[in-house]
Image (cartoon, grey):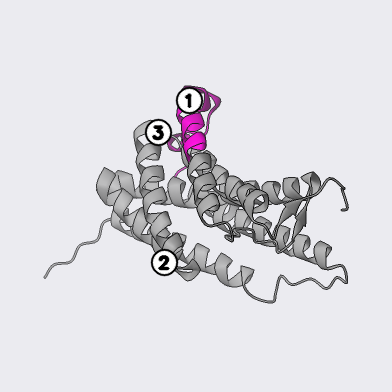
Amino acid sequence: MNLQISSNEIRIAIIIIGSILFYYLYYYLANSRLLNVQLKNKRQKEFLLFFTKKMAGFFILGVIPAVLYFYFFDTSFSKFGLTGSQLKSNFFVILILIIIIAFILFVNQKVNSRRNSLQLKLNEWNLFLFTLNCLGWIIYLIGYEFLFRGILLQECYINFGLWPAIAINVAIYSAIHMVNGKEEAMGALIFGAIACYLTLIRGTILIPIFMHISLSLFSDYFSILLNKNLSFVMKNNH
């Protein structure tokens, strides 16, 4: 058999494997003791660890892959649709998706009132603490989406077409969520398929970025609002 490998095949193979390896690197770093900090104040320690993990995710999943991609593969980021005009033209699509996500999460939390999506294990929350929580998620998810719905999805789309690109992306996206249980893995299948499809037909990763940020922030908000073991308080003890 005469096996001939083109430069495009090598390129897409590197990007698929690289995307998985970057996520593995982040996952094992975030779950190792390397990021642990020694502070007596438990709340401060939790927040510092949370932010350290989110910033590590932003750099490992977003910044480093973006620099390598720009240097070795493509000097133009235009295919990702990160422009003000794309945000303007997709504003109502993004708004509708945010409303739908918020409604689904609200109903889900009402049905499963004991559910707690928060990574910060605090019982009492205030505006300052919740704002820090949101900021951490926003930073992390921008990097996360740039790797998975940006570099990985776009390169698969260029090489394989629409549906194979979505299938590859969703398979990887769902698989890395299996450590969080079958419910989250199944949710990742649905969310991932919708996010990938809209990214490709609308030509921008702004849509999945806003979708994923909305998913995380509303999930945490409704957990605090509707879980009897959690609560918002008026005082700003930070």
Q: Which quadrant: the N terminus?
A: bottom left
The magenta stretch spans which residues? 74-100
Cα distance in 3D space between marks 2 and 1: 32 Å
Q: Residues within 10 Å of mark 2 (few under 14, many from 20)?
A: few
User: Between disc 1 and disc 3, whose residue precedes?
Assistant: 1
The amino acid beneath tag 1 is Phe
Q: Is 184 left or right of 54, judged from the image as shown? A: left
User: Between disc 2 and disc 1, whose residue precedes?
Assistant: 1
Cα distance in 3D space between marks 2 and 3: 31 Å
User: Between disc 2 and disc 3, whose residue precedes?
Assistant: 2
- 92 within the magenta span: yes
Closer to the camera, 238 or 168? 238
Residue 52 percent coordinates (x, y): 71, 61
Badge 1 is on which residue? 92
Closer to the camera, 135 or 1? 135
Q: Residues within 10 Å of mark 1 (few under 14, many from 20)?
A: few
Please name the residue shown 79% across and 71% down the image: 37
- Residue 182: assigned label: 2
> For the image shown, how many numbered marks are present on the structure?
3
Badge 3 is on which residue? 203
Residue 122 percent coordinates (x, y): 74, 61
Circle 1 — which element? Answer: helix
